[in-house]
Image (spheres, coloured by chain):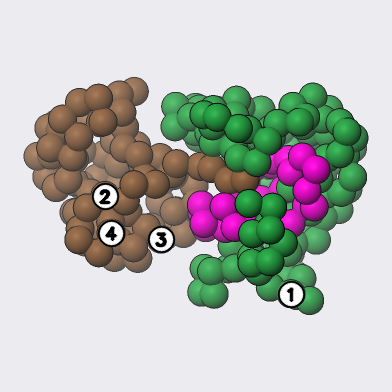
Amino acid sequence: MAKIIIPTPLRKFTGNQAAISTNGNTIREAIVDLTNQHPDLKNHLLDATGQIRSFVRIFLGDEDILSLQKEETMVAESSIVSIVPAIAGG
Amino acid sequence: MIAAKEIVLTYKENHKKDRYIIVPIIIRRQIERLLEGNYPNEGVGFFYGDEKDNYRIIKRILPVKNVKEGDQRKRFEIDPRDYLQAEKFAEEWSLSLLGIYHSHPNHPAIPSVHDLKRAVPYFSYIILSIENSITQDWTSWRLDEKVKLFEQENLVI
């Protein structure tokens, strides 16, 4: 169980909801549950193999999951997970 | 790299969407001063405001650091932690996070291939062309997800 904060650019795919409660014990499970609840998000978050896209960063609280156990990082009911689009350009 | 910016089409030609971005004079000066100060590197920041129908009015900006490693004259990157903070500010200020402004030093205010590749939905992308630390042009764009090209918006400045 975790609450996932949706970044502004993706809220059009969640009916403008900024936060979604999800089931799952890990970041991966929570993200998959999120995309099951809101299928239009799937293309933006997961690649063809079901992995979290490289341009999408995930934070558990203030910690980047890359410095934790990545997608296998455990989440609790009180966890706040933020999806962060990796913004870049030229 | 320069050739790619000129040859590959990144936007819908001869097509301006019926959308408007209103930039008050104070905000305009803030953005120009910041991006001209970043010259010859690319500068970047977020902007916030209100949205109604096809109109977006900018009320605040949040400059952030270009953290692109290496040559910053043709690339920018935003630290994910700065992005997190930017979303928090939107909540604190009760404003919508509407988009990103960035500069094209010594290049036209036309989205580059890299801009298109990394574009996210919903955001307006304001681009300033800057030469010798002086702003030459402003444009604003939004991604059309269906055709994966930018659509130009009308800037009111």
Whether the residues at callouts 2 and 4 have beta carbons within 8 Å, the answer is yes
Identified by mark 3, the residue type is: Phe
Identified by mark 1, the residue type is: Glu
| Residues drawn in magenta | B99-126
Q: Quadrant of the C terminus of chain A?
A: top right
Q: Which mark is residue A52?
A: 2
Residue B15 screen position, x and y as percent:
75, 75
Identified by mark 4, the residue type is: Asp
Mark 4: few, some, or many residues within 10 Å (few <14, many ≥20)? few
Chain ID for label 2? A
Residue at label 4? A47
Is label 2 in a helix, a strand or a loop? Answer: loop
Q: Quadrant of the N terminus of chain A?
A: top left
Q: Earlier along the polypeptide chain: callout 4 or callout 3?
A: 3
- A6 to A13, vertically: above or below: above
> What letter labels the chain drawn in brown?
A
Instruction: Report the front residue among B122 and B14.
Output: B14
